[in-house]
Amino acid sequence: MRAWSAMIAVILAAVAWASPAPALAAGSYQVSACNFAPEAANNSWTWATSDPAVPPHYAEHDNCPYRLGGSGGKEDQEGGLSTTDALGLSSGATPGTSAGWTFTAPAGTTITGLTYERYIGHSLDPRNSWSPALRADGAIVAGETCEDSLQNGETCSVGGPPGTGGEPARITALSAHELSLGIVCQAPSGDECVTGATEHAVWATMYGATVTLSDPTPPTLSTPSGALWGPGEAGGFHKGTESVAVSAEDAGGGVASIVLSADGHPMETYTAPCNFTFAQPCPSSTGTQTLSLPTTQLSDGKHTLTLVATDAAGNESTVASEEVTVDNSPPAAPVGLAATPTQTGGSTFTVTWSDPQGQLAPVTGALYQVCPITGSGSCTAPAAAPAAGPATVTVPGAGSWSIAVWLSNAAGNASPANAAHTNVVVPPSSSGNSGAGHTATAPTPKVHVSETLRGRELVVHVTGPTSGRVRVGFIGRLKGRIVASGAKTVVLKHGRLTVTFRLGPRTAVHALIRVSARLDHQAVVTSTLHRRKPRPKPTR
């Protein structure tokens, strides 16, 4: 066996034909094994022999990761992925028989390069019948023969066993479907290759390898389906969270991912389980995958959705594209809301309005609700009305009422937060009268109400009989909308009481404020606050 120091010239020769590591070309991927792979795994090189002898004339070893052993002895020969000849008791290996480790490219891909560390050789073989070498599609790769003038054998190391300081070799410009590292008997016909244990030996060992493969074919996408893809299920619009189902296939390195994007921005990604220690690192088919999109992350309006599948080599599929219209917002408030009594003094009103312009989804309906402005009572349940009105609304009875109207659209969006409001007053004589013509005599009010404004404090004064329960309230309006309200029930003693309400700054300064009071079940009396204009400062 040749000493390691004698191999330096061979290592330098190997480096001379090994080119620098090229950048990974588009449409390419790499598969690593043994000491070049994570966790020193081997899932891509397989051992095989063509020798029919029993027992076979060859032995295989999968000792990954390789750990530094002796200087050219069996520990080096059988480290990593290795093949050695085995002692044949009855006969040697016949010409043409072989054994070794093979990497086979998946269909549709081509091996274009290799980075590796290996140790091959044979000793005490005077006829040079053994050929240990790296082969591409059966032919020895240029620079991989160990031609030597020594009769007894030849030994080549590329990179040396890991830990010896050698640099890996790199082979580029390959175009092969299969790589193999092994030994072949090339004895003349009728002769044989001697197999032995110590005196006659041949070996081929791969300590680590990274194979570069070209995969020019992009993956294919199935036809997408689901609520997100195609006409929206909400009246032709898309809202809330919707999904699309799709699958992808790739015959080369497999499918790595599927990305759903909106207007070019990735929204959700399916990532396939890929392992680049396998010749086909990613699955050939993803099966049906469901990708979801919360449309609330998009503005209302038109958007372009795309689906793109990417394979292990970075090839992208033809883009699947769909234009959708998103609408997650309710219509704006009705315009010009007004209520007209159907009969003077009655409690039934004709409510009219106009639909706002510039809505994305068409307005398809309206809802209205009646709420008391002051005093006790609760709001009525929302009721439906035509999109552009009018609506016939009957309030529960005498008193002050607020009628709210809001709109719904073709996408099914509606919100009372976007309501318009109008106020109506039904006099006591019409309590329970829907305009049918009957009247009722209202009791004479027994209280009097007045108010003053002290900064942000609204002070309400009530006078009346010597005793009774009085409901005192106020409502503040700004530009026709109710901005503040409040009510308190107090006991009137000795014919006089005062109630104070705390107002917000805007209400105190700008709002139209109306106060009301009602003694027990008597009629409501009201008063409107009149602010005093500040006196001008005298000029000197």
Image: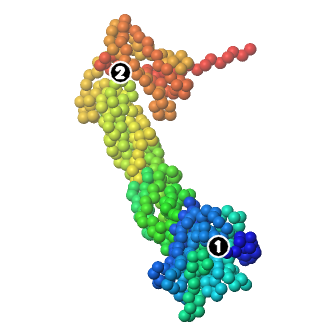
The mark lying in front, picked from 2 and 1, is 1
Q: Is residue 185 left or right of residue 344?
A: right
* Secondary element at tag 2: loop
Q: Is residue 506 above or below residue 261?
A: above
* Gap in angstroms between the C-alphas marked 2 and 1: 107 Å
> Within 10 Å of the Cα at label 2, are there few (<14), some (14-19), or many (20+) other Cα atoms?
many
For label 2, the residue is 524
Q: Could you tell me which residue is drawn at 53 percent across and 20 percent down?
A: 456
Quarter location, residue 208: bottom right
Q: Is residue 43 left or right of residue 520?
A: right
Quarter location, residue 228: bottom left
Q: Is residue 19 above or below residue 67?
A: below
For label 1, the residue is 119
Locate the N terminus by quadrant. bottom right
Q: Give the amino acid at mark 2.
A: Val
* Secondary element at tag 1: strand
State which tag comes first along the sequence, 2 or 1: 1
Q: Could you tell me which residue is drawn at 57 percent across and 72 percent down?
A: 82
Quarter location, residue 474: top left
**Front residue (pair 287, 113):** 113
Q: Position of residue 34 (x, y in %)?
A: 58, 66
